[in-house]
Amino acid sequence: MEAKEKSAGQQLKDRLAYQFKHIGQTHPEDIEPALAFCEDYKVFMNSSKTERECTAYLEKLAIDHGYSAFDPAKKYNAGEKVYYVNRSKNIFLVTFGKNSLAEGIRFNIAHIDSPRLDLKPFPLYEQDEIAYFKTHYYGGIRKYQWGTVPLAMHGVVMLKDGTQVKVCIGEAEEDPKFIVSDLLPHLSAKQNQRPLNEGLRGEELNIIIGNIPYHDEEVTEAFKLKALELLHERFGMTEADFTRAEIEMVPAYKASDIGLDRSLVGAYGQDDKVCAYTAAMAAFAVKDPTFTTVTVFTDKEEIGSEGNTGMASHALDHFVEDLCESAGARKREVYRHSICLSSDVNAAYDPTFADVFEKNNSSFLGHGPVLTKYTGARGKSGSNDASAETMYKVINCMEKENVCWQIGELGKVDEGGGGTIALFMGDMDVDTVDLGVPVLAMHAPFEVTSKLDIYHTYKAFCAFYR
Ligand code: MN
Ligand code: MN
């Protein structure tokens, strides 16, 4: 059948109106590579549930990809790759560019902390013959979602003699898991009357760790003692050592494919390790870039980026100062000419909860990375709000290399809001914009992303570095 010629109006619309299509429609050839790309992503997610584990995993990958530890006394040539680890919780990956440092850096910054349940400094107690951990949640969680979720225990303990012990229970198939209980429907009539944000309250996020007593009629708190005995056997720790520990309770779920078509990935902590993974892969892939690239994996974003492993600190600034000294460049000149992707996730449009989104400015699963011009709340407050020039530069990078991308706001005006690290790079006098993967059920114990988006985010980061 001969194609019918388009009407004048259709032709005009083709020329003037914005087309917004699923990558599966416009680039069906990308489906297979996207599915293949996400196989290693799932492995990464299962090995990187905390910022420390993620840093260690990326350090190992970086060394495998020919990176060496940064030496501030050394001069580096174009194409050389170095890394720097900050306090076991951040890693910075550098590829030196052909241009001088004074011509600016291409920064790409993702965060590797995710919402979770942290143990309190004295977490261990027993109540009515059950041993528990008391927790203080980290980041913005919907507390009711964390009941009856299998949890794993991750972290480090500093023993009295200064030895550091790594803790990880609940990840191996045969490992025990841990759990926060919730009421049965038969007895929850009163709890059902609570507002959703109090479905489970902060002091109800108590984690069950045991139910067998230490066998001694004379001893009190025998269930707690049994737990202490087991922890001592395994880690050599005592109750006091919890005060020198960082223990994070995270979902024990493994990353998996979602959907009959395996189009999606379900995993804990995809905010923001989906951007961390794609950023790392782009950093590894870049060879002889024009501009020096600095890929940053940061911590504490979920609680405001405070502390010396968060982006509000001077940790990155000091590192850039070291780079400048080694290259004989002026730091302020470097920043002024730099451009930064704040690579963080955004909320994917959810058809089931459509009323919190403004559809024309929402990001859709399968439409590519989301370019978020501004975040914030109540009139863009707390937002970096990228300039038209910065939007142009980043969009241009992507379109030159056929990367699918989309625009996204975090929900309707005044529906809520959120922030990223973008404003901290803005403070440093760097042009910055948010770019990342859309996520369904963000901050839930199991978050969902699209493989096509992940793949095109990787492509976007590669394009940005080239
Ligand atoms: Mn995030
Ligand atoms: Mn977040």
Image (cartoon, grey):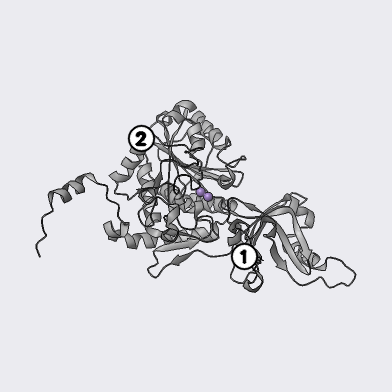
Q: Quadrant of residue 202?
A: bottom right
Residue at 27% x, 47% y: name it.
18
Between disc 1 and disc 2, the foreground one is: 1
Instruction: Identify the mark at residue 192; answer none if there is no mark.
Output: 1
User: What is the CA distance from the residue labelled 1 to the residue labelled 2?
Assistant: 48 Å
Residue 101 located left or right of residue 192: left
Q: Position of residue 312 (x, y in %)?
A: 57, 37
Q: Using the image as rendered, state which of residue 65 and residue 272 is in the foreground.
A: 272
Q: Position of residue 258 (x, y in %)?
A: 44, 66
Q: Residues within 10 Å of mark 1 (few under 14, many from 20)?
A: few
The residue where tag 2 is placed is 388
Q: Residues within 10 Å of mark 2 (few under 14, many from 20)?
A: few
Q: Using the image as rendered, state which of residue 230 and residue 347 is in the foreground.
A: 347
Q: Residue extending furthest left?
A: 2
Q: Secondary structure at mark 1?
A: helix
Q: Position of residue 277 (x, y in %)?
A: 46, 52
Amino acid at dot 2: Ala
Q: Secondary structure at mark 2?
A: helix
Amino acid at dot 1: Asn
Q: Residue extending furthest right?
A: 218
Instruction: Identify the mark at residue 309; answer none if there is no mark.
Output: none
Lower position in the chain sequence, tag 1 or tag 2: 1
Residue 348 located left or right of residue 418: left
